[in-house]
Amino acid sequence: MGRALIIGAGGVASVVVHKCCQNSEVFEEICIASRTKSKCDALKEKLDDGKTIITTAQVNADNVSELVQLINHYKPDIVINVALPYQDLTIMDACLETKTNYMDTANYEPLDTAKFEYKWQWDYKEKFEKAGITALLGSGFDPGVTGVFSAYAAKHYFDEINEIDILDCNGGDHGYPFATNFNPEINIREVSAKGSYWEDGKWIETEPMEIKRVYNFDEVGEKDMYLLHHEELESLAINIKGIKRIRFFMTFGPSYLAHLKCLENVGMTSIKPIEYEGKMIVPLQFLKAVLPDPASLGPRTKGKTNIGCIFIGKKDGKEKTYYVYNICDHQECYKEVGSQAVSYTTGVPAMIGAMMVMTGKWDRPGVYNIEEFDPDPFMEALNKWGLPWKESFRPMLVD
Ligand code: NDP
């Protein structure tokens, strides 16, 4: 079918590469390109005996001309951006210049401000339309599958959806007192920010971790979960008809929260550069350097994740509820691809999103969030490629 250029060689990229290689009919050739080429070569070495032809390259994805040179040389059908959110715009610029399709799993965030919103990427809409190429934004799990679940619920079960609660539960235990399951810098920026949710046409802001609920998750059990701001709230509030309230909750254990509070209190989560021994350093980047690499958590993490969406809305004039979720086992993921479930649940939808664009199932020039496309082929692919989903029509609701 075609070739994909994968940018990044971290925890999520590793799963994307494994999954592309399992799907060699679509991904006949892939190029893994990242800042540290040795990480790309290590991935190639693990997977080089399959049908997909793998090449590697070194690239600084902050530099548009380097990216353009690489894309012009490799000529991919799509660029899969699984580097960091800071690189979204430079990679989109390079895709525009070379007229190449684009896909990512997280929205743009400026390096010096912990503010993630879609404005910057939505501003590319007209340029992508004119160039005749597609940018698929947020094809991980959340954002990603949560948007597909929402489009699926809207298409098949509701005339209008009034409320969505997205519940992200990680019931896994890696045995460390404190570690993050994906890039620590991005993770800590996200969870230490103020919370917010959308209600009656406006954002309601909360203090970080101010709103706590307890939920009994299928196959995981009872967990404390906290309301966070999360990027898909912004696009779903616009794209899903009839929305009055949308919230996002994530589970955290007491040890994670106690460590986070302490690190915040001593200034270690700050992104303001400070001078240390004559050199400027960013405390959060230093903290990342001493924390366990999320890609190394695979062999130690036991337990399951359970991520899904609860919908409340109307069908034929009657109120209706619907819950759709995926359960993923950390150890099973490790057995299959050598990664824990958080990388797995992000990398599988990234491969599927790229497949949707490459096979022409999702083929519309412009910049789109995932819920703007037909959810059916993606839902089918989730079952096939390792993230089967479950449904309930009488879920426990969140107050
Ligand atoms: P990692 O830190 O493990 O990997 C990031 C990779 O990007 C590294 O290989 C890094 O290179 C590379 N990179 C960073 N800067 C550059 C640059 N300037 N040029 C080239 N390569 C660069 O992160 P994860 O794999 O955990 O996360 C990847 C992405 O997935 C993030 O954007 C994250 O927000 C997103 N994500 C999305 C989720 C979802 O459900 N939607 C869930 C989890 C993550 P080096 O090795 O040299 O540092």
Image (cartoon, rainbow, N blue to C red):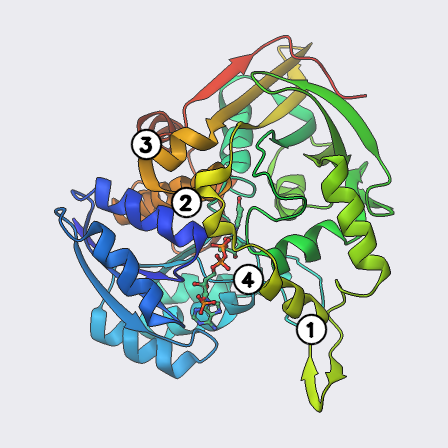
Q: Earlier in the sequence, mark 3 or mark 4?
A: 4
Query: Horizontal and vertical percent for residue 175?
Result: 59, 38
Residues packed near mark 4 inside 10 Å, few (<14), some (14 to 19) or many (20 plus): some
The kind of residue on which mark 2 rests is Gly
Residue marked by disc 4: 85
Residue marked by disc 2: 347
Q: In the shown orientation, is residue 225 left or right of residue 58?
A: right
**Residue at disc 2, secondary structure:** helix
The kind of residue on which mark 3 rests is Trp
Q: In the shown orientation, is residue 44 left or right of residue 373?
A: left
Q: Earlier in the sequence, mark 1 or mark 4?
A: 4
- Check contact, mark 4 vs mark 2: CB within 8 A: no
C-alpha gap between disc 4 and disc 2? 15 Å
Q: Earlier in the sequence, mark 2 or mark 1?
A: 1
Residue situated in front as seen by the camera: 256 or 114 = 256
**Residue at disc 3, secondary structure:** loop
**Residue at disc 4, secondary structure:** helix
The residue positioned 32% from the left and 69% from the top of the image is 38
Residues packed near mark 1 inside 10 Å, few (<14), some (14 to 19) or many (20 plus): few
Residue marked by disc 1: 112
Residue situated in front as seen by the camera: 336 or 103 = 336
C-alpha gap between disc 3 and disc 2? 11 Å
Query: Horizontal and vertical percent for residue 331?
Result: 43, 31
**Residue at disc 1, secondary structure:** loop
Residue marked by disc 3: 385
Residues packed near mark 3 inside 10 Å, few (<14), some (14 to 19) or many (20 plus): some
Q: Which mark is residue 352?
A: none
Residue situated in front as seen by the camera: 264 or 102 = 264
